[in-house]
Amino acid sequence: MGAGVASAPPRGREERLRDTRRRLETDVDLWVATSGSQDGVHLVPLSYLWDGSVFLISTPRASVTGRNLLGDGRVRLSLGTTRDVVIVDGAAEPVDTAELGDERRAAFATRTGFDPSGIAEPYQYFVIRPRRILAWREANELRGRVLMRDGSWLD
């Protein structure tokens, strides 16, 4: 166990919400889990842009993740470590580059350090709307770990 993590008292909802929102705003990478194709369940790390309400990711359109999200928009995201984790269940929607707009595409490239527009392989952007967000550090934080339900924060 990490030093001091297990012995720390559980965070209250306000602190946990603040920590979770900070992580969404400051982290750059997350794990993306998808399913729904003949390729089955798939897990990849991707960079993202969080705008305060939705995630924006980009992946090759023909990749397993791209095909899974195009076929079945259900997605699970994970940020942080196993001892300080945020799990997001959401719905992914494909967004064409033209719909995305120059400003948002530039914001994604600046935030992530990655601009798929210069790559020959066709990339697809996806907007992911969180439906449920959970966050916990240790077993003593399992109670109260749901911070968003049905797309609404539980402030």
Image (cartoon, rainbow, N blue to C red):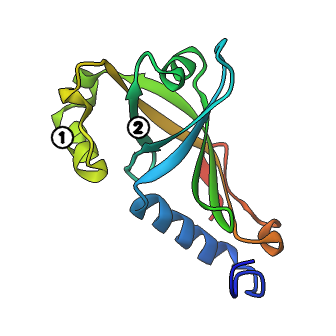
Decide which of 129, 119 is in the foreground and name it: 119
Quadrant where the image shows the N terminus? bottom right
Which residue: 81% across, 65% down?
142
Image coordinates for residue 116, horizontal then vertical, percent: 26, 31
Q: Which mark is residue 68?
A: none
Q: Which mark is residue 57?
A: 2
Query: Disc 2 on helix, strand or loop?
Result: strand
Residue type highlighted by circle 2: Ile
- Local crowd size for mark 2, using a 10 Å CA cut-off: few (<14), some (14–19), many (≥20): many
The C terminus: image quadrant: bottom right
- Identified by mark 1, the residue type is Glu
Q: Nearer the viewer, residue 21 or 27?
A: 27
Q: Residue 102 appears in which quarter of the rendering?
A: top left
Can you tell which of label 1 and label 2 is closer to the viewer?
2
Checking the image for residue 103, the label placed there is: 1
Is 113 positioned to the left or the right of 57 in the image? left
Q: Residue at x 44, y 51 (%)?
A: 29
The answer to whether residue 135 is above or below residue 41 is below
| Labelled pair 1, 2 in contact (Cβ < 8 Å) | no
In x, y percent, where is residue 13? 68, 72
C-alpha separation, residue under disc 1 versus residue under disc 2: 15 Å
